[in-house]
Amino acid sequence: MSERKSLQRKKELVASYRERYDRANRTVILFNFQGIDAFPLSQLRAEIKSLGGEIVVGRNTLFYRAFEDTPLVDHREIFTGPTAALFVYEDVVSVTKKLMEFLKETFQDDYRDRIKGGLVSGKYVSPEDVLAISQLPGREELIAKLLGVLKAPVANLVFTLKAVPQKLVLTLKAIEEQKSQGG
C-alpha cells in the first residue's frame, strides 16, 4: 500500500514540476545547492519569489521525467548530484542575476560551477549562457534607457521651439535699441 502511495506521490511531483515549467514560459535554471544552509536558502527563496521566480529542490530522476520531452534530455549530466530548479515566471534577467549574486557571495570563486544549465523559452542554455544572462541589464534598466532615448528628441524640440521666440525678441530689442540710438 505505501509503495503505491510513494509512486503516486512521485507522479504528482513530476506533474507539479511540469506545471511550474509551463507556467514559467518554459524557463528553468538548474543548479547545485549543496553547501547552502537552510536559512540562507530560505532567504534566497523569498527574494527570488519577490522577483517572480520559485526555487524547488527535488530528486534528479523526477526532474528528468518532468523535462524528458525538452532539450535537457540531451544533457543527462545536469541530472547528477544535488539539484534545485529555479522556475522564472517574470523577468529572467533579474531572477538570474539574484541567483548568481547569491552563489557568488556564498561560494566565491567556484560559484560558476554551481550552475548546471537550463532552458529559456524551451531552448537549452549552458552554464556560460546563464552567466551571460545574469550580466544583461534588467527589464527596469532597459525601460529607463528606452524612455531616455524617447525623451531626448522631445526635449531637443522643446528647447529649439523655445529658442526661436527668444531670438526673435532679442533681435527686435536690438533693432529697437539701434533705432533709439541712431534714430
Image (tube, rainbow, N blue to C red):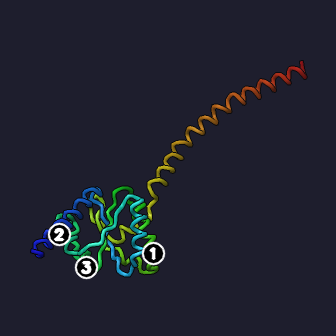
Identify the image quadrant of the N terminus.
Answer: bottom left
Badge 1, how many Cα within 10 Å: few under 14, some, many 20+? Answer: some
For marks 3 and 1 on the same chain, the one whose residue lies earlier in the sequence: 3
* Residue 133 seen in render: no
**Residue 53: which quarter of the image?**
bottom left
User: On the picture, is 137 further left or further right than 69?
Assistant: right
The kind of residue tagged 1 is Lys
Tell me the CA gap for discs 3 and 1.
21 Å
* Residue 22 seen in render: yes
The mark closer to the camera, 3 or 2, is 2
The residue under label 3 is 80
Give x and y (percent) for residue 180: 88, 20
Give x and y (percent) for residue 37: 40, 79
Badge 2, how many Cα within 10 Å: few under 14, some, many 20+? Answer: few
Query: Image point 49% across, 48% down: which residue?
Result: 146
51 vs 63: above or below: above
Badge 3 marks a residue whose secondary structure is loop
Front position in the image: 129 or 54? 54
**Residue 75: which quarter of the image?**
bottom left
Identify the image quadrant of the C terminus.
Answer: top right
168 vs 149: above or below: above
Residue 104, which numbered label?
A: 1
Badge 3, how many Cα within 10 Å: few under 14, some, many 20+? Answer: few
Badge 1 marks a residue whose secondary structure is helix
The residue under label 2 is 9
Query: Image point 36% across, 55% down: which residue?
Result: 90
Front position in the image: 38 or 25? 38
Query: Image point 40% across, 62% down: which residue?
Result: 95
